[in-house]
Each structure stands twice: as C-alpha cells, then as structure tokens.
Amino acid sequence: MKMKIKIAHLYYDLLNLYGEQGNVLALVNAFKLQDISSAVDLLTVGDKINWNKYDIIYIGSGTENSLLIVIEDFKTHIKDFKKAVKDGKYIIATGNSHEIFGKFIEMNNQKHEALGVFDYYAKQNPKRIVGESFMEFEGLSPIIGFQNRNTVMQRRGNYLFSVLNGYADNYKSSYEGYRENNFFGTYMLGPLLIRNPHFTDYIVKSILKEKKLAYEETLNTFEYKAYNEYLKNFYES
Amino acid sequence: MLTSLLIFLNKLITLACKIFKKNGTVYPASIVLKLNKDILEKIKYPKYVIGVTGSSGKGSTTSLIAHILKSNGYKVVWNKSGSNVLNGAATLIMNNSSIITHKVKADVLLLELDESFIKETFKKSTLTHLVLTNITRDQPARNASAEIVLEKIINSIDENTHLILNADDAIVNKCTLKHKGKITTYGIDKTKYSLDKPISYCLDGAYCPKCNNKLIYDYYHYGHLGKYKCSNCDYKRKVDYLGSKIDLEKQTMLIEKNKVHLYKDVFFIAYSTLAAYALSKELGLKDSDILKNLNINIFETERMKKLKLDNREINMLESKNENNLSYIQSLNYINQYPKNKTIILGFDNVSRRYKYNDISWLYDIDFSILDTKNIDRIFCIGRFRFDVAARLINSGIDPDELILVDDISNIITLLSENSSGKIFTMVCFDMTEILQNLFIRAEEGDEDEN
C-alpha cells in the first residue's frame, strides 16, 4: 500500500485565528508534489488523540480566552505530548499557541498556569507587537512572516530563529521562537508554510529522509514565485 | 466662548477646503481637536444620538436609517461621506452645531462609527442607541481579533445606550451577557440559502461565551452568522425582530409579517434592512411609516457608471481586503450569475491604513465555494498575484484557468484576447480605481475609432 502522511490539525476551531489552516494545506501540497498523499484529521476539545498515528501535528494561534480553553483541555495530553517531542515528532505551533506549552501566561494582571512542558513564559506587553519579520533558520534565509501579539516571551536557549529584521521574543533578545527536537514554535502567524515554501520543503525533506524516501526539488510553484516577489518588493528594495 | 470659536474655526476650515477643492470631511476637526481634544463634550446633543458600528454593513445600514427617518420628517444629521473615525465624526458634528448655543441642529445625530473609535469620539453616555451589525475578522493588523473589538465596543458605552444587536452573530450576542442597558435583537430565520455547515475553516463564535462549551448551529447564513445554542448551558440566540423568506432574485424578504423590498440583491442588505427596521420601530415609528419608505419611496444608491469592454458587461464588486466575509459575499454573488464569466482579482497593497502586508486573511477566504462551471478565466493582478494564484490553486481551482498579469496596463488586451463572458472584478480600493480607469479609457478609445 502506498504511504500516506498523517497530519493532525489540533484545535482547528479555536486556534485558527489568522488563516492558519493554510499551513496544513501547504504541507499537503508539498507532499503531493512528492507524489505522496496526506490525510488530515481536524481535532478539538474533548477529542481523543492517538499521538503515534500522526507524522505531523499542527496548531495555530488563538484569542486569549481560546488559549485558556485549550490549556484546560490539553492537560489530558501532556504525557503523550512530552513523549511526542522526545521521540522527534514534527510539531509545528504558529502564532501565540506555543505559549501554552510554557510555565505560565500573564495577561490582564492575572497569571495563568500553562502546561509547563517547556521552560519559558509569556507576559503581557503594554503595547501590541504588530509587523513583518524576517528570520534566519539554518541557512534558509530569510523566513518571512507576520506577528500580531500582545505578549513577550522570556526564555533561555533552544531558539528557533535568529531575527534579521522585525520582532524577537522580547525587546532584549535577538532570537525568536522555540525548538526542541522537531517541535517548532514561533510567534510568526498565518500561513507561514505557504509563504515560506523553502521552510516547508525542509520539513518535508526531513520527514522523507527519516522514512528513507527520495525527495525531489520543485522550485517553480506559485508559492516560490510569491516568496521571491515578496523579497523583491519588501526585503531587497 | 472658546467652544464657539472652535466650532467657528471648524466651519471656516471646511469652507476653505471647499474653496480649494480639498476633501474637508476629516481635516477640519483634526486641527480643532489639537486645540481642544474635549470639544465634543461641550456640544449639546439632540434627543437621539444613534451610532451604527460593526465589521461590515455599517454604511448601508446607516443610509437606510437616514432614509427612513428623514422620510418621516426627522431632521437628521449623518455622515453620508462614510468618514467614520474621530476626525470625520467631529467635523460633521461641529459643522452642524450652532456657534452660539453649541446645539446640534437636528432631531437625530446618526453616525456610522468605526468599531475601534467609539470611545475616542463620545463620552460613554452620549449614544442613545447603538446598532451593532456584526463582528467578523477584519483588518487583523489593526483590530487583532473579533473578541478584542467587542471589548472595545462594550467599554465605549454604558447602561444609557439602547443596543440594537444582530443576534445571529454569536460574538455580537455576547453583549447580552455584559450590557446593563436596554437590548433589542434581530436575526434571520432559515432561508433557501442557509447552510448546514460553515463554508470555511474560519470558525469564529464556535464556543459559548458564557461557559466555553461548543455552540451547536442549526444553520449558517454566511461566515459564523446563523442560529445557535450552547451544548451545555442556556446561552442561545434570542430574536426580537425576525427576518425570513429572503429571495435575492426578487429582492424581497419578510420582516415579522411584512413583505419588504431589498434595494440590492445581496444577502447582507437583508441584515441592513432588518437592522434599520428594528431601530425605527424602537424609536416609535409605525410599521406603515417604515414600510412605505422601504417599499414605495425606495432608497436609491448612487449608481456606478455601467462599464463595458468589447460589448461585455463589467460588474465591479468592491471586496474589502483583510475581511474574508466581504470576499465570500462577492464569491456568492458571482456564483449567482449562471452564464459564461471571467473574474479579475488581486492587489498591490493589503491596506490603505497601514503599510503592513500580512496576507493571512487570504486563507480565511474559502475560494473553494466558487462554482467554476461557467468561469472561463481568472486573472490574477497586482504585486500579490502569485500569492492569490497559490491560494486559488490551494482551493482546488485548475491552474490552467489562471492568467497572471505582470503588467496591469496590458490587462485590456489580455482580457480581449484570452477570455470571454461577463467580467467580474473582485478587488479592493486601489485596484478598483486602476481598473475602472483602464476600462473607461478602453471604451473611450473604441468610441473614437467608431
């Protein structure tokens, strides 16, 4: 039987604030270009999750209230989630969703206990942080994206991106996001994987390598053209 | 004395703008408010100060309310120009206020208000009525999220304001839990256009604002607007004024038991009409006084010049960037046209308010609802044409249907040589103007040749 990539889109109806289902589409399409089909499961509060079943777990951004609902529900998944991270499962968290895996989130002068999987925490910033960002990731420069958040993040090490231009975790840092094995958490929101086909291909290539499958590069997609056009108009100029 | 001088100054700057043919709908108050930021608190307001706010439909709702009230003998001062932020509202108010008494010279002050600027414009108790049309994803770089917009609105008013709410919007309906003043609601019953499932992944209003459990929807009209109830607690949609039996082809609907004319064949006009009806009733107007101005003395919109290219009709649909429901309504409208058609979409800039070019909203628009059966070609234009093309293909649209336009000045030739059928443009402010000029020039060129 031909192999199928299995993707879980977690909390698709709560943490999907900025067109982030586009990231799931990006993965499906990137595998399709490799002649590999995908199956996507939309999962939410109260659903049982068979963590072993999935090759990729995706989770997007949400409102403050949605994050709190998810923290409550996710408590039943902490053990499986920790194991998934340790086992090198590909987990991609965009926007503010990676905040839930830290120690706490401080909002409106209230400290909300988070899931405590990673050693970082988020605190409300007096002003919303909004704008374009350009990042460096393992030579895949630049990663382009947009941030729109009201928190700053305090963490030490395991950074995902170095900031070339734009917003870091907090005003003193020059790094953004969190990486542990194949957990990728970033404040960059929206269809990040659509906008950065080279980053998506990095993930696809890595998964195929683990599965001992060949990867064939395709650079003439509209996503690549859009990426190059964006750089021409907004980065290089 | 100072108030009189400032009102006079506002009127003087407005006159100067007129003389020098500059847009004077916003600029005068920008100067006056610098001299006294509290000037609007010195104004003596009329009996009715009505605000209309929400992510979309504010303009059409405000126009209909103005039409009904004026036709019933009220003197109405309203922001016809659509300048709905602080400087626009303040310019209008001061221009219509007496220099001596500081009174607004009207029975009703009616304002379309930007949902984020109500607090900056008025003291909490100023608005006697506030119509809230909907709160949807709109300009996220500015508004962040619908919940934040709702909080801003709720924090802008107090119990002295009578809220007129669209209860089909579960986010708007959250006001019923928080507002301490009078509330009147309106909503639309199941229609032949209703859907069992939401048409996109964009699932705002999916959870109960009271207990955080999942809401169950009986049907959706568009976006997250529909009939819902909580799966756990007693939170549900309650409607005082119910619209039903919408027929867009005939441009009619029922409100309560009355047949009402819709001035446009688009669904959101049913909401605007219903909101205007509900407010008018709450102000004490009789059914007959409202209905005669909806059905006989029909509200007329400014008609856009009808454009043609090679004898092909052109329909320019203004689609607001960063607002998925605006695009979805354009898609629904295009779907209603049963014959051969060509579509143009794309943009150079995401916003005219700010320089950010976040394209996340493109992925909140479910382009897969586009019925491609009669679509000949889709032209992708502007600096983001490749992003638009990628989005369309991701929605299942055949890449062979797409034509990427690298140079917009070539679009007339490309349309003539490579496409057929009625042309629908589905673009925002910047591209509407560019395309309109190109179409007009092409038509004038044809006339010269003849």
Image: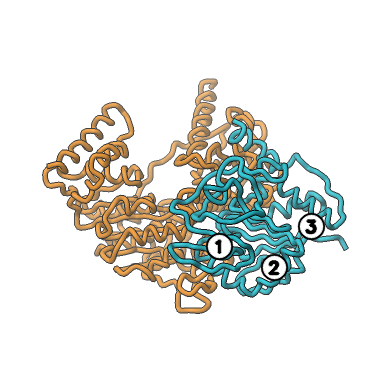
> Toward which corner of the image does residue A98 lie, by quadrant?
bottom right
Q: Looking at the picture, which amino acid does disc 3 mark?
A: Ser
Q: Residue at x 49, y 36 (%)?
A: B430
Q: What amino acid type is highlighted by mark number 1?
A: Leu
Q: Residue shown at 65%/45% (left/top)? A: A195
Q: Secondary structure at mark 1?
A: loop
Above or below for A193 versus A10: above
Query: Tag 2: Cα neighbours inside 10 Å, few (<14), some, or many (≥20)?
Result: few
Viewer-proximal residue among B64 and A143: A143
Residue B270 in view (yes/no) = no
Q: CA distance from mark 3 to mark 1?
A: 26 Å
* Residue A37: mark in rendering: 3
Q: Nearer the viewer, mark 3 or mark 2?
A: 2
> x, y (%) of residue B184?
34, 67
Chain coloured cyan in this rendering = A
Residue B442, by quadrant, is: top right
Query: Residue at the location (48% across, 59% down)?
Result: B247
Q: Is residue B367 above or below residue B241?
A: above
Closest to the observer, A176 or B233: A176
What residue is pinned by disc 1? Answer: B203
Q: Chain of mark 3?
A: A
Q: Are marks 2 and 1 on the same chain?
A: no
Residue at 45%, 66% (x, y): give it: A110
- Type of amino acid under label 2: Lys
- Horizontally, is A215 left or right of B7 in the view? right
Label 3, residues with CA under 10 Å away: few <14, some 14-19, many ≥20:
some
Query: Horizontally, is B14 left or right of A33 in the view?
Result: left
Q: Residue furthest top?
A: B449
Quickly name the residue at label 2. Answer: A82
Q: Please state if B171 lies on the left or on the right of B178 as rendered.
A: right
Q: Position of residue A104 (x, y in %)?
A: 54, 65
